[in-house]
Structure formats: C-alpha cells, structure tokens
Amino acid sequence: MAIERLIRMAVSPMFADPDPESEQVSQATLAARVKILEEQGGYCRIETPDAYTGWVETRDLVDAPETWGTEPRWVEI
C-alpha cells in the first residue's frame, strides 16, 4: 500500500522535477490526500486524487490522522 499524506498548504505547486526552477506542472490544494511515489532531497513526487503527478516540497505535507476519511461528514445549517 502506498504511503499517503495530506497537503498542509493552501496551494502547493507541483514541479516536473525536484527543483523549484523546473516547470510547474500542476498544484495541490489544502487537505488533498496524496500518494507518495518517491522522495528525493527535500521533495516528494506525489499523485493527486485526480491522477496528476509532480514534485512538491516535503514540508508542504503532513501525515494524515488514522481516522481521516472514515468519520461521517455532515453540515449543520
């Protein structure tokens, strides 16, 4: 099973390579649950829920709580 983490920034740029000077290929948004595909030099190559891949800074990620996604969701009005 792949390691999953959450994006902890409002928007985290995703780069083509583990280098902020490389092309930005997409972006990941706050609380997105992403798969970690590879780690290298302060960057992780991730896959977003909509199947985009790219490199983000490791500091933009946080471990998901064990109960994340298992609790019922509702909105009170």
Image: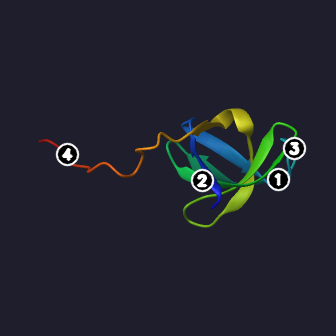
How many C-alpha atoms fall within 10 Å of the one at disc 4: few (<14), some, or many (≥20)?
A: few
In the image, what residue type sits under mark 2?
Answer: Val
Cα separation, mark 3 vs mark 4, equals 40 Å
In the image, what residue type sits under mark 1?
Answer: Glu
The quadrant in which the N terminus is found is bottom right
Residue at the (56%, 65%) spot, across then down? 50
Residue corresponding to mark 1? 23
- Nearer the camera: disc 1 or disc 2: 2
Residue corresponding to mark 4? 75
Q: Is residue 25 visible?
A: no
SS type, badge 4: loop
How many C-alpha atoms fall within 10 Å of the one at disc 2: few (<14), some, or many (≥20)?
A: many
Question: Which label number is shown at residue 54?
Answer: none
Residue corresponding to mark 3? 19
Work out whether mark 1 precedes mark 2 in sequence or the reverse, and give the earlier one: 1
In this picture, residue 25 sits left or right of residue 74: right
The quadrant in which the C terminus is found is top left
